[in-house]
Amino acid sequence: MRVAVARETDAGEPRVAATPETVKKLVGLGAEVVVARGAGLGSGISDADYEAAGAKVADNVTKDADVVLRVRRPATADLKDYKKGALVIAIMDPYGHDAELKAMAAAGVIAFAMELMPRITRAQSMDVLSSQANLAGYRSVIDAAEEYGRALPMMMTAAGTVPAAKVFIMGVGVAGLQAIATARRLGAIVTATDVRPATKEQVESLGAKFLAVEDEEFKNAQTAGGYAKEMSREYQAKQAALVAEHIKKQDIVITTALIPGRPAPKLVNKDMVASMRDGSVIVDLAVERGGNVEGAKAGEVTRVGGVKIVGYLNVPGRLAASASALYAKNLLTFLETMIDKKEKKLAVNWDDELVKGTALTRDGAIIHPNFQPKSAA
Ligand code: NAD
């Protein structure tokens, strides 16, 4: 069983799919681990660190590998270097990338999309959306603090008092909850909003104040899967009115709102941005999915009047060492379920719901029900 750890080809990707800790565990499970030269540098891990953990380091690692661990989907041009039947495990970003999925099928690899992992208790330790969103939520507050020209905590000094910053978090999923906790630790006065009623108690338990239009629609806004529904126009208008009043008084706004399979909801319009005082900061964590904030630009910090709008891409990658450590552990835990520990070889159980939920391609075809070619639908 040969496990390869690839070097990421995307220039904006500093994370890596294995750490010395997970390499050691894989070796213990009977794997021969080969790490691409320099793969860990963006996360502060040297080739020597991997070698000390029991891996070999090489330039071309995928050719004979039975398993390839990656952060992102392999580039189509590189698939010729993958073995037929190899398991390729990564964040595959499958939506809207039909040609790339077809190419992986044609290359004969078995591609697993980690972001499709079912959110069930057994798979919590394999949930890359949570492990990475948690760090993004933390980093969003640090990025906001960096752009904000004032202190966050209240400080009473001989030279005068610095007031505590007012921070408003919009969208209280995994990222939003960590943003609330981080802003509180830094001493800010925190308020938060979401359309799912379950979040109210979570917000309050973190010592922040909850703000939302709590009507009948709100009471039913959570899907059975625990996600938000797309809200009606009427709800959105009421929500916008409430937010408009609140946002004027905020120093920092962090938006994290997403709806699975839909563009991110627009929550902050340009009039709301203009109503904020000069020096305020908005961080849009949803910018990769279309953005929650009007005027946010992917990959940039923009200035709209006196307000800065932060739209960094790959925010977990801005904490690459932590993000890699958690991501590598997510991959290891998933891969372990596909290894026969006695025989020390791969044994994929195709009936396992974790496998069924994440496998995109197999035997030359796209097998995931959500990504069947249109003509076959
Ligand atoms: P997400 O990234 O899909 O969305 C972020 C937040 O935006 C959500 O809280 C959502 O309700 C909110 N949102 C959507 N539209 C909005 C609007 N118009 N206004 C304000 N907020 C809006 O969410 P997530 O972080 O993936 O978490 C979704 C749910 O999944 C949560 O209930 C979370 O606790 C749950 N979860 C479960 C597991 C598990 O069981 N293994 C793991 C992680 C998360």
Image: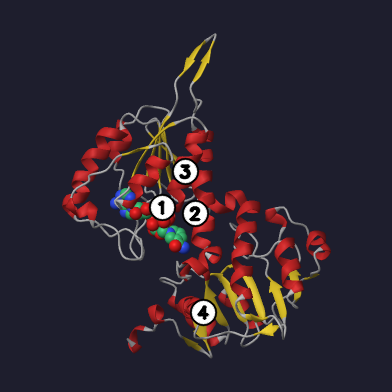
Reply above or below: 152 against 10. Answer: above
Question: Of circles 4 and 2, which is in front?
Answer: 4
Q: Quadrant of residue 47?
A: bottom right
Q: Which mark is residue 133?
A: 2
Quarter of the figure that contains the C terminus: bottom left
Q: Residue at x 45, y 30 (%)?
A: 188
Which of marks 4 and 3 precedes in the sequence? 3
Question: Circle 4 sits on which residue?
Answer: 355
Q: Is residue 265 visible?
A: no
Which percent across, then down, holds residue 253?
39, 38
Q: Is mark 1 within 8 Å of ligand 1?
A: yes
Say which amino acid is labelled 3: Ala
Question: Circle 3 sits on which residue?
Answer: 179
Question: Circle 1 sits on which residue?
Answer: 173
How packed is label 2: few (under 14 Cα within 10 Å), some, or many (20 or more)? many
Which percent across, then down, holds residue 142?
53, 39
